[in-house]
Image (cartoon, helix red, strand yellow):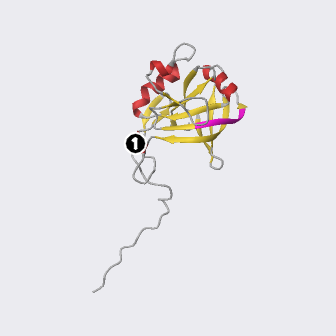
Amino acid sequence: MLYPLPAVMVSVTDGKGNDNIITIAWTGTVCTNPPMVSISVRKSRYSYEMLKNTGEFVINLTTEKLAFAADYCGVKSGRDVDKFGEMKLTRKKASFVKAPLIEESPVNIECRVQSVQELGSHVLFLAEVLAVHADEAYMDENGKFDLQKANPLVYSHGEYFAVGKKLGKFGYSVKKKKRNKKIRK
């Protein structure tokens, strides 16, 4: 019941010219310093062996515009189809890993696996973040990623949703309110 979750497309490679995309909702940030993330994948997935053998992947954030591709990449197997080709997604060379970035994604996070833990139905890949690429079109005037421009995709109980409106920012619940000074005459 830990919902909603980000729906991300994770790109992988076997290092021999075969790339794949797997859609994952079981992902997240786990550490700030060093920057680390995790993804959980079933052993039966085509991408599993690529992840295990290369120890590298790219988390590509999704948007409302990428919802169809994200769903397709989550239900079709890379054993049967070239997901990049079918979804007309552009491979872009990464800076540190062999797995390609998805150019249409607003943010790409290059990762190198630090540890693998078998948990039961899924295997957890704990990885260090090597690089983050953000499309300038989604940055605001202060250099912050603008969620409202990107319309990020989240997943909840088998359904996809776009993220809604901003409600506040970190610390707004305890921020001191400015007092209006009354002017006495």
Local SS, label 1: helix
Q: Amino acid at mark 1?
A: Ala
The reply to whether the magenta stretch includes residue 25 is no
147 horizontally vs 18: left or right: left
**Residue 17 sits above or below residue 172 on the image:** above
State the residue in front, 69 or 179. Answer: 69
Bounds of the magenta segment = 110-116
From the image, tell me which residue sits under label 1.
137
In this view, the residue farthest toward the left is 185
Q: Quadrant of residue 130?
A: top right
**Residue 167 sits above or below residue 111 on the image:** below
**Residue depicted at 57% across the width and 33% down the height:** 58
State the residue in front, 107 or 66. Answer: 107
**Residue depicted at 67% across the width and 32% down the height:** 124
**For the image shown, how many numbered marks are present on the structure?**
1
Image coordinates for residue 31, horizontal then vertical, percent: 64, 46
**Residue depicted at 49% across the width and 33% down the height:** 155
Tell me which secondary structure the magenta stretch mostly adopts: strand
Residue 164 seen in render = no
State the residue in front, 144 or 159. Answer: 144
22 horizontally vs 169: left or right: right
